[in-house]
Image: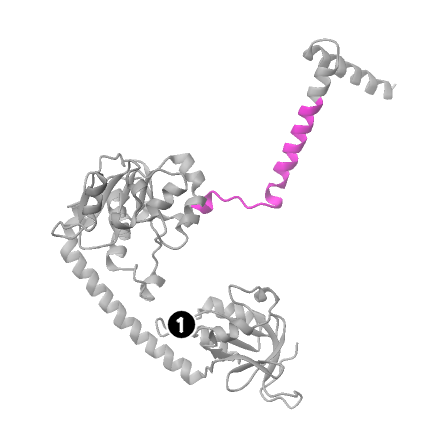
Amino acid sequence: MRRMSLFSRTADLPGLHGTLRDCTSAGRGFKRLREGDIAVVDTPDLSRPDAQRLLDAKPAAVVNLARFSTGTVPNFGPHMLLDAGVLLVEGAGEELASGLKDGKKGRVTDDGEVHIADRTIGGGTVVTQEAAERSFSEAQQSLVDHMEAYFGNTIQFIHSEGPLLIDGLGIPDTGIKFTGRKVLVVSPGTGHRNQVKQLRNFIREYEPVIIGVDDAADTLVELGYKPDLIVGNPAGIGADTLRSGARVVLPAEPDGHAVGLERIQDLGVGAMTFPAATDSATDLALLLAGYHGAQLVVNAGAPLDLDAIFAKDPTATPAALLTRTKLGPRLVDASAVSGLYTVNGGRGIAWLWAVLGILVALAVIVAIVGLSGPDSFLNNLIDTWNSFALTVQGWFN
């Protein structure tokens, strides 16, 4: 498709014309994105890999429902597109998303409005080189300020919880054997239920110690698993789950006060406390498993990476970082483990199905032959084979 410039003299209506492609996670337009098209994305803080993927398709314009740079991280994606001469429009939002029709002919005007024919379906702000540079500089300074504060809090946590991190001071003895065993810690994060389902083969093979964190313990029970240990505030956990026979550990403040102790007492369930300066039950569960000698700790529902720290994710605390660093190579995310148990279908295993089909067919033939004669099963097979051999011999005589 030929790329048209702004206010092309050959166009009936002003603007950059092209086919609209819905390249958001809800759309499938990325596979059909071609040179000269108008790509609509929903990608805050567009990264270099995302920008390169767009550049490879050579769109004339990219309209972002979000902002290309939110100010959280200094990202180079917008610069790459602008350097290639791609028109960028950001902050188009819900209005454009609701009116977008993948594959329709559309146009983008120089003030950031998106049209189909003479109908406006949304619009945003045109991103210039100057604006992109300004956003990058501001985000860079913001990130530096954030990380200085973050590691200041990290030092403070080490100062208050050094004995816990170094020698395990305050970690309770649950009576559960962890040494040399695999441990599964399930936290109530996004997608944790599906992750547990994907780990069913891992659970079946290794029978790990299962720790339910907060209301993720309810998820485990609903999926048919009995947690060995529950760590969290019992106020948000079902009574049947608390009575399931699992040992219960309550996060407590450094002075020993534990929220939810009254509920435990009302249910008549025994519990122990875990005093620490962090209120994250996931952090406590990981420390508990690591201190008691777990061979491998698989964590579902609570991933942590540098991007989460940069983005100021409320779960990406200094305590979370130090906890995971303490466990080191023994800690893996559930998504990595489930990937080891996933076999992709298709040609790779087609031959297995073919062999299985042949074996089944042979078994059926043997059964029919063995049962069809007047003699015993084995004699019937021998008679049939001798008859077949004589017939073949006759073909060559």
What stretch of residues is rendered in magenta? 338-365
Is residue 301 or residue 349 the one in the foreground?
Answer: 301
Mark 1 neighbour class, 10 Å CA radius: few under 14, some 14 to 19, many 20 or more = many
Q: Main secondary structure of the magenta part?
A: helix
Residue 291 can be seen in this image: no
Query: What residue is drawn where x is 37% and y is 35%?
Result: 207
Residue 71 screen position, x and y as percent: 35, 74
30 with respect to 331 (left or right):
right
Element marked by disc 1: loop
375 with respect to 137 (left or right):
right
From the image, tell me which residue sits under label 1.
Answer: 75
In the image, residue 378 above or below residue 306? above
Query: What residue is drawn where x is 37% and y is 82%?
Result: 134
Residue 18 screen position, x and y as percent: 62, 78
Q: Is residue 281 magenta?
A: no
Residue 66 screen position, x and y as percent: 44, 73
